[in-house]
Image (cartoon, grey):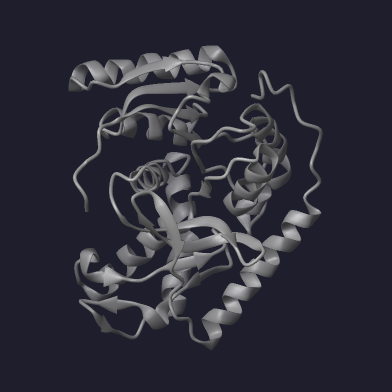
């Protein structure tokens, strides 16, 4: 890890829901920025969140200055986090994250139009994140767009495996890639503990990865702290504060899906682990599924770019 960089001037967060709130609160204590700009469905929502995290800033003696704004005022930010979610009923029992595709697409299209040409970093959290990340990137034309999801899956994988084997999570090295959803790929064949390859109970791990988000949502309404942590970790790499690997949704061989990216001074290089035959087939299946889902996504007309939420 390199020495901490001077905080960037501003980071923006779009969305004042559960994840947006958690990200905003985390940024107050992160040391990554001097200003925190918050946008939401209405300026009143954004102002309310700004007031709440301003109280937090004061109690913690943080130097971060939060304020509310419109989406179009975010173009001077070093990074923008997209954490919006449309209102929709989701009755899916399988591929649950895919349930938001049609509802969230118009919001993402409008945000892409509003931020067209933005040259900072964009981290998309909105599900289904692999589709929404690609959609935002193609509509906006922004060159540095990444999706949060596979890095959270990877963190959950390392935690689950560490618990099963009664070891420290810091000794576990392994990745979850592909779709942030039911067709994620557990890279068991390349997983190590203290540098040693070990047998991984893949199906048991996959069951936990499938059920953990639902258990959290059932108990507290929405997953929020985990995604916020994944956002901050990705911000540190993409802003060049620290070097390392993040599993992020990004373009890869004609599709968009979660792949490990090695960041050096903010510049990413794909570093896909060696996959065995089964994992390679699963990875190809996830890529094919996401391509097909994106092609069939019916994109509505963009909303008013001046007020996309």
Q: Percent position (x, y) of residue 182? A: 58, 64
Viewer-proximal residue among 50 and 92: 50
174, above or below 136, in the image: below
Q: Image quarter for residue 109?
A: top right
Q: Is residue 278 visible?
A: yes
How far across and down, in percent of the image, does residue 8 sit? Answer: 33, 30
Q: Residue at x 23, y 79 (%)?
A: 195
Residue under the point 46% across and 13% down: 47
Point out residue 20 in the picture as x, y percentages from the top left corner: 46, 32
Q: Quadrant of residue 162?
A: bottom left
Question: Residue 236, relative to residue 198: is it above or below?
Answer: above
Residue 201 in view (yes/no): no
- Name the residue located 60 percent from the left edge and 81 percent from the top edge: 281
Taking the image as shown, residue 99 lies to the left or right of residue 65, namely: right
The quarter of the image holding the C terminus is top right
Q: Nearer the viewer, residue 173 or 165?
A: 173
Number of marks: 0
Looking at the picture, tell me which residue is in the foreground, 268 or 27: 268
Q: Residue at x 25, y 38 (%)?
A: 5
Residue 103, position in %: x, y? 71, 39
Query: Vertically, is 98 above or below 69?
Result: below
């Amino acid at each position: 890890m390199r020495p901490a960089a001077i905080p960037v001037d501003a980071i923006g967060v779009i969305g004042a829901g559960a994840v947006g709130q958690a990200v905003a609160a985390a940024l107050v204590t992160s040391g990554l920025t001097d200003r925190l700009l918050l946008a939401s469905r209405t300026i009143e929502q954004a102002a309310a969140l700004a007031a709440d995290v301003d109280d937090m800033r004061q109690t913690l003696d943080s130097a971060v200055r939060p304020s509310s704004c419109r989406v179009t005022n975010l173009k001077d930010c070093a990074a923008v986090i997209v954490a919006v979610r449309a209102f929709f009923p989701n009755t899916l029992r399988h591929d649950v994250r895919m349930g938001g595709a049609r509802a969230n697409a118009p919001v993402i299209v409008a945000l892409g139009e509003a931020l067209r040409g933005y040259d900072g970093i964009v981290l998309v959290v909105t599900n289904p994140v692999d589709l929404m990340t690609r959609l935002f990137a193609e509509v906006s034309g922004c060159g540095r767009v990444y999706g949060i999801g596979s890095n959270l899956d990877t963190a959950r994988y390392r935690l689950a495996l560490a618990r099963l084997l009664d070891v420290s999570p810091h000794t576990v090295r392994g990745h979850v890639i592909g779709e942030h959803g039911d067709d994620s790929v557990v890279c068991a064949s390349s997983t190590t503990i203290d540098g040693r390859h070990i047998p991984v109970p893949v199906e048991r791990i996959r069951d936990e990865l499938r059920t953990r988000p639902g258990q959290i949502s059932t108990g507290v309404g929405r997953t929020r702290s985990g995604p916020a942590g994944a956002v901050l970790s990705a911000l540190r790499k993409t802003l060049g504060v620290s070097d390392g690997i993040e599993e992020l949704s990004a373009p890869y061989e004609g599709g968009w899906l979660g792949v490990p990216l090695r960041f050096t001074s903010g510049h990413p290089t794909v570093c896909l682990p060696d996959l065995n035959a089964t994992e390679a087939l699963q990875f190809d299946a996830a890529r094919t599924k996401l391509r097909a889902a994106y092609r069939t996504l019916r994109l509505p007309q963009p909303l008013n770019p001046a007020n996309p939420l």
